[in-house]
Image (cartoon, rainbow, N blue to C red):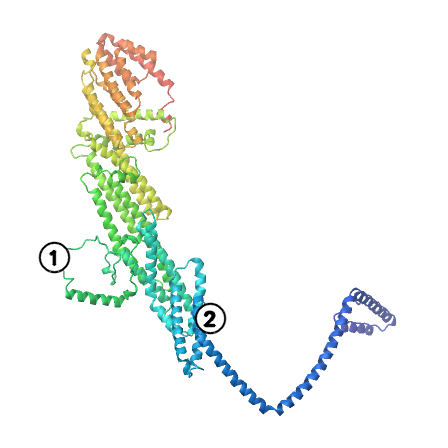
């Protein structure tokens, strides 16, 4: 079946119809096929009619345009035929008059040449003024074109015209002026100060100037002159930036560290040198490939590093004779020590001649005349100046090495100079300075008593006096950490220096402290108590210890603190009750006690400061092993500081034993009424001693530390006094009054120190007041008011009451047993009520 629609190849349809008719000889089938074809043709005709009807206007316009185009083509053919005929006629006429035309053509050429020469002469005459105008306006490309064009006319077509001799000389002079102006502008562009917004515009100008010089034909001479002036111009940049930084710092009101000023200067110089290198790179790239280049960008970078090396010598090398041959007047250390000589020959004729010769040789070798820095330096010459500039300098050196594409493992001379300066000069000088300053602070008669003055105290920021040596150590370590962070490639070297400083300081303070607490003849008791592990653990586990160091404790920890203070007092009493205590077993000199207090505050201040300082190392990602070793040293400082505070805390307890233990030997309190009103001499001595210690420590310790030293002393005195009752044989009523008066005197003195009533001494006084009563009354009062002391304490009081009142005899043994049983029952009832409340129940 034949499909309706557009058929791209009508022949294929026809062939299909023919094949169909050949295959079927039946007329009926052929008629059917013909009808199908007729229907298809009719359908196509209908579609064609619809398409023509729908696009009638477009078809009409197309037919009209086709007719117009066809008529236009016909007209063009007619006109072309006419033109061809007329050209043939002209050709015949010209052939007849060709000799006459040739003569006219030659005359025209001659007249045209004469006019051109006259125009050139006029332009040559106007060229100098136009060139001056264009130079003033900065139109260098047009200026060069004008002067080059005029010079070419003078040297070519008009070279034999004698009347133009003066004008030719003027043009040649102007040509040289333009060249010199271009060189000056190039130098200004290359070495001028450009900010970020101006750099792009300057690079474009550089290309224009390079093109202008090429047009002048002076490329080789210009590049050679630029190469020869690189050193001088680089030195000029340094002089300019030095003056700029100096003037800027002079206008500031506050004083700036010299290292920061030098760092600012070098940062400015780096920016300018990068700009110079970029300008030279642009200039060299702008030159024609055929142009010979007397230098490359590598030469520029090498000259930059050479000039920088000379500049660093001026600021780093105090004695530069061994490092460089070149000398200058900048950075001379006027205060340097010189070896005194008996005779000098430097002013003799031979010496002057020799010095002049050597100076000229140095100038020839180093080309120093072109790298001389005339500006006044921004800071004094010092090897320590390397610390503030090392990072930026290393970065710039790496940048230079990358730009010149140096081989791996090799370095430029500037890098070698910096490394040698650090290793051979700076580190040695720093080590010597640190050692000298530390020795001056520690190697004194008594390093524990040399306190920093008020100005340094203010710098330390501590409320308590600080040892001068601790302040020196902190400044040194802070300086070394700062150097370590700046010169991070030498971490191990400076870490060893820091450890050495800390270890020397530790030895300088630990040795006199040990001589103080462990003298040759007899050990100090407070040192023995401090070294007792159980007692140390008990004290450091107490809330008052944490409170002394500013650690927050729970609000309900006061009761626990009292329980632990009581346990501490009992432990100390057990350790000291059988010892012979004398002046040789205590820190007798109060200035030594003040030194211990100062040492404690100094070590704590130094440890806290150094932890913050070492925290900078952590933030900069330093080796954990290094930090661990530093923290171990700080741990030794912390431990020694805690020992000092423990010495002071326990020293007061030992003094109580020194003065009060002799009171209870023998029948000292079996006295009459006349002696009851007098306070014992030992108590008065203890009172005086405590007041003196208060005066010494109050200005040396922080309030919380001062409170810790005396806190719990009431509990210690209570335990000591009540233990003293065990040693009494008898005590009279006047003796009770006397001991109560002693307790009141001690309580009043201690209250004035701690600003606390010390209720523990009230308990001691009430304990001895029980002895006013006879044994039956004592037991009855305990039964009435309830037990306040232990069963053993009551038994001691009961036995002393019997002895004092003379009521203990063989016949009273049963009565005594009954009183003991009654006390035991009362105390047991107290224990049953409080059986769940022990020391372990308190949150420490």
| Residue, far left | 342
Residue 264 in percent (x, y) is at 35, 53
Say few, some or many: other residues with alpha carbon within 10 Å of mark 2 (under 14 / 14 to 19 / 20 or more): some
Res. 629 in view: yes
Residue 326 in percent (x, y) is at 25, 63
**Residue at 23%, 24% in the rendered image:** 656
From this view, report whether residue 385 is shown above or below residue 842: below
Identify the mark at residue 142; answer none if there is no mark: 2
Quarter-of-image position of residue 747:
top left
Identify the mark at residue 481; answer none if there is no mark: none
**Residue at 27%, 53% in the rendered image:** 380
Quarter-of-image position of residue 774:
top left
**Residue at 24%, 12% in the rendered image:** 801
Res. 529 in view: no
Nearer the observer: mark 1 or 2; the answer is: 2
Disc 1: which residue: 342
Q: Quadrant of the C terminus?
A: top left
From this view, report whether residue 54 is shown above or below residue 520: below
């Amino acid at each position: 079946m034949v499909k309706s629609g557009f058929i791209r190849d009508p022949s294929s349809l026809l062939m299909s119809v023919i094949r169909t008719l050949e295959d079927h000889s039946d007329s009926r089938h052929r008629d059917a096929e013909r009808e199908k074809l007729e229907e298809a043709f009719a359908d196509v005709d209908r579609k064609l009619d619809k398409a023509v009807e729908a696009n009638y206007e477009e078809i009409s316009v197309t037919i009209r345009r086709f007719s117009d185009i066809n008529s236009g083509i016909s007209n063009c053919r007619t006109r072309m035929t006419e033109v061809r005929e007329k050209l043939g006629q002209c050709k015949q006429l010209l052939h007849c008059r060709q000799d006459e035309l040739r003569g006219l053509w030659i005359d025209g050429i001659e007249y045209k040449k004469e006019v051109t020469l006259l125009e050139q002469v006029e332009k040559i005459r106007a060229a100098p003024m136009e060139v001056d105008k264009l130079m003033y306006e900065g139109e260098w490309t047009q200026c060069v074109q004008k002067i080059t064009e005029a010079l070419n006319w003078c040297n070519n077509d008009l070279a034999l015209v004698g009347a133009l001799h003066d004008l030719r000389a003027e043009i040649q002079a102007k040509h040289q002026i333009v060249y010199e102006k271009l060189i000056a502008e190039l130098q200004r562009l290359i070495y001028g100060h450009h900010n970020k917004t101006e750099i792009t515009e300057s690079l474009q100008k550089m290309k224009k100037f390079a093109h202008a010089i090429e047009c002048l034909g002076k490329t080789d001479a210009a590049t050679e002159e630029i190469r020869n002036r690189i050193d001088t111009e680089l030195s000029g940049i340094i002089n300019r930036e030095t003056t700029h930084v100096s003037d800027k710092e002079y206008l500031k009101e506050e004083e700036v560290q010299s290292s920061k000023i030098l760092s600012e200067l070098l940062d400015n110089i780096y920016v300018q040198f990068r700009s110079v290198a970029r300008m030279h790179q642009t200039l060299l790239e702008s030159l024609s490939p055929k142009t010979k280049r007397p230098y490359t960008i590598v030469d520029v970078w090498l000259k930059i590093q050479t000039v920088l090396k000379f500049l660093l010598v001026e600021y780093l090398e105090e004695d530069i004779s061994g490092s460089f041959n070149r000398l200058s007047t900048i950075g001379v250390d006027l205060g340097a020590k010189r070896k005194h000589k008996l005779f000098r020959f430097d002013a003799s004729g031979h010496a002057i001649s020799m010095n002049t010769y050597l100076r000229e040789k140095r100038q020839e070798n180093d080309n120093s005349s072109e790298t001389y820095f005339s500006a006044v330096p921004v800071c004094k010459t010092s090897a320590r100046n390397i610390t503030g500039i090392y990072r930026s300098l290393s970065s710039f050196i790496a940048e230079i090495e990358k730009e010149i594409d140096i081989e791996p493992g090799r370095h430029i001379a500037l890098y070698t100079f910096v490394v040698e300066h650090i290793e051979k000069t700076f580190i040695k000088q720093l080590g010597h300075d640190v050692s000298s300053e530390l020795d001056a602070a520690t190697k004194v008669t008594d390093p524990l008593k040399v306190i920093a003055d008020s100005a340094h105290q203010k710098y330390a920021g501590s409320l308590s006096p600080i040892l001068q040596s601790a302040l020196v150590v902190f400044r040194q370590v802070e300086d070394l950490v700062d150097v370590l962070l700046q010169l991070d490639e030498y971490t191990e070297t400076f870490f060893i220096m820091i450890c050495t400083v800390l270890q020397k300081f530790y030895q300088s303070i630990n040795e006199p402290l040990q001589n103080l607490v462990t003298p040759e003849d007899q050990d100090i008791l407070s040192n023995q108590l401090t070294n007792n592990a159980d007692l140390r653990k008990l004290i450091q586990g107490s809330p008052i210890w944490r409170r002394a160091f500013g650690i927050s404790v729970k609000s309900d920890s006061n009761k626990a603190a009292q329980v632990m203070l009581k346990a501490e007092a009992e432990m100390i009493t057990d350790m000291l009750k059988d010892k012979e205590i004398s002046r040789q077993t205590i820190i007798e000199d109060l200035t030594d006690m003040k030194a211990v207090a100062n040492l404690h505050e100094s070590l704590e201040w130094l440890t806290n400061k150094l932890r913050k300082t070492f925290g900078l190392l952590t933030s900069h990602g330093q080796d954990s092993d290094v930090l661990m070793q530093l923290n171990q040293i700080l741990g030794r400082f912390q431990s020694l500081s805690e020992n000092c505070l423990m010495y002071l805390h326990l020293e007061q307890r030992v003094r109580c034993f020194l003065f009060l233990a002799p009171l209870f030997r023998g029948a000292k309190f079996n006295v009459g009424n006349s002696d009851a009103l007098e306070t014992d001499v030992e108590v008065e001595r203890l009172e005086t001693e405590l007041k003196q210690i208060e005066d010494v420590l109050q200005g040396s310790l922080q309030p919380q530390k001062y409170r810790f030293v005396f806190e719990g002393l009431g509990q210690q005195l209570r335990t000591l006094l009540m233990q003293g009752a065990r040693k009494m044989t008898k005590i009279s009523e006047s003796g009770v009054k006397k001991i109560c008066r002693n307790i009141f005197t001690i309580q009043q003195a201690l209250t004035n120190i701690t600003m606390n009533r010390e209720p523990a001494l009230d308990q001691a006084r009430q304990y001895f007041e029980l002895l006013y009563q006879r044994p039956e009354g004592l037991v009855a009062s305990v039964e009435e008011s309830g037990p306040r002391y232990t069963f053993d304490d009551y038994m001691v009081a009961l036995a002393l009451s019997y002895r004092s009142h003379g009521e203990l005899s063989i016949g009273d043994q049963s009565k005594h047993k009954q009183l003991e049983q009654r006390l035991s029952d009362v105390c047991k009832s107290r224990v049953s009520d409080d059986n769940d409340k022990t020391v372990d129940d308190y949150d420490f």
